[in-house]
Amino acid sequence: MNYLYIIGASLILSIIAGLIYIPGIVIISKRKNLYDVAGGRKPHKGNVPRTAGLAFFPTFILSFFIPLIIAELAGMWRDGSYREFIMQIGMLLTGLSMLYMMGFVDDLIGVSWRRKFVVQFLVSLMPVAAGMGITDLNGLFGINEVNPWIGGALTVLAVMLIINAYNLIDGIDGLCSSLSFFVTAALGAWALTHGNPVYALVSASIAGITAVYFYYNTTHTRFRTFMGDTGSTNLAYIIAFLALMYYNSQIETGAVNGHPLAILMGLVSLPLLDTVRVFGVRISKGLSPFHPDKRHLHHKLLELGLKHLQCTLICFALQGCSFGINYLMRDVNINIVIAVNIAFMLLYTLSIDALVRRHRGSVGADSGEC
């Protein structure tokens, strides 16, 4: 019960910090003309401050460590169980600080994808250094235990994929923050109910500021803002650590609650598979996987004439359906689950493509009549 008080305090502190930090950052951004300018690939109207992500990292630190210190001083955390996670939290903070600075520079003046790749590679080594590397694929492609070096490489690849997936999905109002809140809340609740209050505290520390950002991002108040790369990469990195925590915990205990990869895919499949699909299409056309275009799912939905929030709700519903499917199939062979995930992604993507073609045809017919 003491843990629940700590988590609640962290969540409230994160919300309060967000309500203070974000409006302040927006005011400074407007005074310094730090805007995300409309036009080109940018689907929004008008110039919007793009630096709200600067609030994420300091809020996380404040709302994680203050409740932890108070609880320790008050004797609420007598077992000192958080101490075994010091290395992991240290690596998490190290990686976050690097992504924070890279995102800040990118939001101000832009950073080449090669430099981003180098930073992402370095921060993806942090969970491996903290002992959180993938050690067992639990039957994926018929593979169980893997060599530590191979497991480390797979961990780096997975973390980099998650970072890019959530960064690239941040193209319309509320999408990245809502999907991030969904996965952090789910994994945080699991951690709290399965004896891992440290990562429950990690989740609560970022969930509050994410909810506050969603409000400012989706409402047209004078404090409307975007998170930028600073926010999306920080969110994605925390999600990666939470995912590895869950996966390793389940592998160590024998995955008594179903296959952990099935649950994780249910939580992150939309941004992950959408990114893999877009990368694949770009490479097949001889382009860089980071070549800017409008092939993402949210771009297709916008082309149908939907508003940003409507597109976000559709994507959130699709992610919820994916999680429901995977949860029901959590005891099924993981290779079958992955195949079903890909099939579901292709089903809704091709269906939306068909609607887009029909919409283009109707628009063209209307234009011809005029």
Image (cartoon, grey):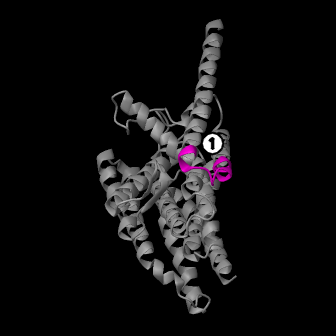
Q: Nearer the viewer, residue 359 or 254?
A: 254
Residue at point 57%, 67% (across, down): 203
Which of the 4 quarters of the picture holds residue 185? bottom right
Image quadrant in which the C terminus is located: top right
Q: Give the residues in magenta.
A: 323-336
Q: Is residue 95 above or below residue 292?
A: below
Q: Nearer the viewer, residue 196 or 292?
A: 196
Q: Nearer the viewer, residue 281 or 5?
A: 281
Specify the amino acid type for callout 1: Cys
Residue at point 42%, 35% (across, down): 280
Kindly tell me whether residue 45 is visible in this rendering. no
Residue 213 is situated, as x and y percent measured from the top left of the image, at 59, 57
Image quadrant in which the N terminus is located: bottom right
Q: Is residue 260 left or right of residue 130?
A: right
Q: Is residue 100 above or below residue 281?
A: below
What residue is pinned by disc 1?
315
Please say whether residue 55 is one of the residues in the magenta stretch.
no
Q: Nearer the viewer, residue 228 or 175?
A: 175
Q: Secondary structure at mark 1?
A: helix
